[in-house]
């Protein structure tokens, strides 16, 4: 089951970030994190590596180790330019 919850992201880096959220997350949980307000629709994928309560039991601070970043770098409709195109064959796999 996929759940969606708002969160604030801090200390964003290539390999990790810190979230503050009201959603209960556990160490080892896999996450997909979206930044919907960014122009290039950035998302990242990672795993929870630490958690702790913040101010009350309803908010959690969560450390995320990131595996990968993804995004559409030329706008939301840039995929339409590539519709119907196919990747070229890999010439390295053929014998010469």
Image (cartoon, rainbow, N blue to C red):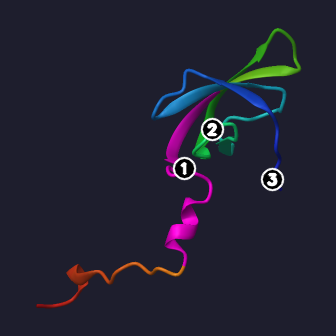
Q: Which secondary structure lies at badge 2?
A: loop
Residue 84: mark in rendering: none
Image quarter of residue 37: top right
- Label 1: few (<14), some or many (≥20) within 10 Å? some
Mark 3 lies on residue:
2
- Left or right: 23 with respect to 67? right
Q: CA distance from mark 3 to mark 2?
A: 22 Å
Residue 38: mark in rendering: 2
The boundaries of the magenta stretch are 63-83
* Residue at horizontal 29 percent and vertical 80 percent from the top: 90
* Residue at horizontal 61 percent and vertical 59 percent from the top: 77
Q: Which secondary structure lies at badge 1?
A: loop
Q: Nearer the viewer, residue 86 or 49?
A: 86
Q: CA distance from mark 3 to mark 1?
A: 20 Å
Residue 89 image point, x, y percent: 32, 84
Of the numbered discs 3 and 1, the one sitting upstream in the chain is: 3
Quadrant, the C terminus: bottom left
Residue lying farthest to the bottom in this orientation? 95
């Amino acid at each position: 089951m996929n759940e969606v919850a708002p969160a604030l992201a801090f200390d964003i880096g290539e390999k990790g970030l810190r979230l503050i959220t009201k959603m209960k997350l556990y160490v080892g949980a896999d996450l997909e994190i979206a930044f919907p307000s960014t122009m290039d629709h950035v998302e990242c994928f990672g795993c929870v590596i630490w958690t702790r309560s913040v101010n009350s039991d309803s908010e959690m601070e969560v450390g995320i180790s990131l595996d990968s970043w993804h995004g559409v770098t030329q706008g939301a409709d840039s995929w339409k330019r590539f519709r119907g195109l196919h990747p070229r064959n890999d010439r390295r796999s053929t014998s010469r």
